[in-house]
Image (cartoon, rainbow, N blue to C red):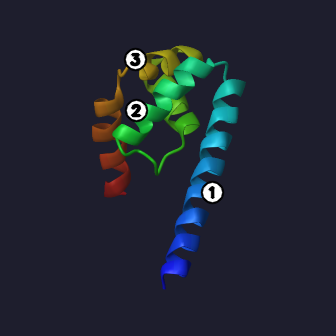
Amino acid sequence: MFNNMVTFIRHRFYFALLRLKKEEQSLLKMGISQEQIKKLIIHWLQHQTLQESLGQIIWQTAKLKSISPREAGKRLSTGMYWDEWKKNVFSERRIR
């Protein structure tokens, strides 16, 4: 049992790292700096918004606030809009 549990944890950790790498690559393509990406990932984990990709969160925030995706990433990396994002978007998604 323990051996299977260790294998399970290794696989989960491996897939989590792959997902973070993909998120990082998509954000770099959007023009967001490496430092901002680190801050975004910390906020993403703290606010438990893992069901959405970071790119999607940035894109939707940019669309809702009528700003560029780069500016949305910059603002999200400083901590803005996360509580609003969780309240509005996730509650709407649960209702549907």
Q: Nearer the viewer, mark 2 or mark 1?
A: 1
- Helix, strand, or loop for circle 3? loop
Q: Amino acid at mark 2?
A: His
Q: Quadrant of the C terminus?
A: bottom left
Judge the density around disc 3: few (<14), some (14-19), many (≥20) Cα neighbours within 10 Å: few
Residue named by callout 2: 43
Identify the disc placed on residue 78. Answer: 3
The image position of residue 66, as x and y in percent, is: 48, 17
**Whole-number angstrom distance, CA of label 2 to CA of label 1:** 21 Å
- Asked whether the residues under the numbered discs 3 and 2 touch, taking CB atoms below 8 Å apart as contact, a structural biologist would say no
Task: Decide if residue 14 is on the left or right side of residue 64.
Answer: right
Judge the density around disc 2: few (<14), some (14-19), many (≥20) Cα neighbours within 10 Å: some
- Helix, strand, or loop for circle 2? helix
Task: Decide if residue 95 is on the left or right side of residue 4.
Answer: left
- Counting residues from the start of the chain, the first of labels 2 and 1 encountered is 1
- Asked whether the residues under the numbered discs 2 and 1 touch, taking CB atoms below 8 Å apart as contact, a structural biologist would say no
**Whole-number angstrom distance, CA of label 3 to CA of label 1:** 28 Å
Residue named by callout 1: 14
The image position of residue 35, as x and y in percent, is: 56, 19
Q: Amino acid at mark 1?
A: Tyr
Q: Amino acid at mark 3?
A: Thr
The image position of residue 86, as x and y in percent, is: 32, 39
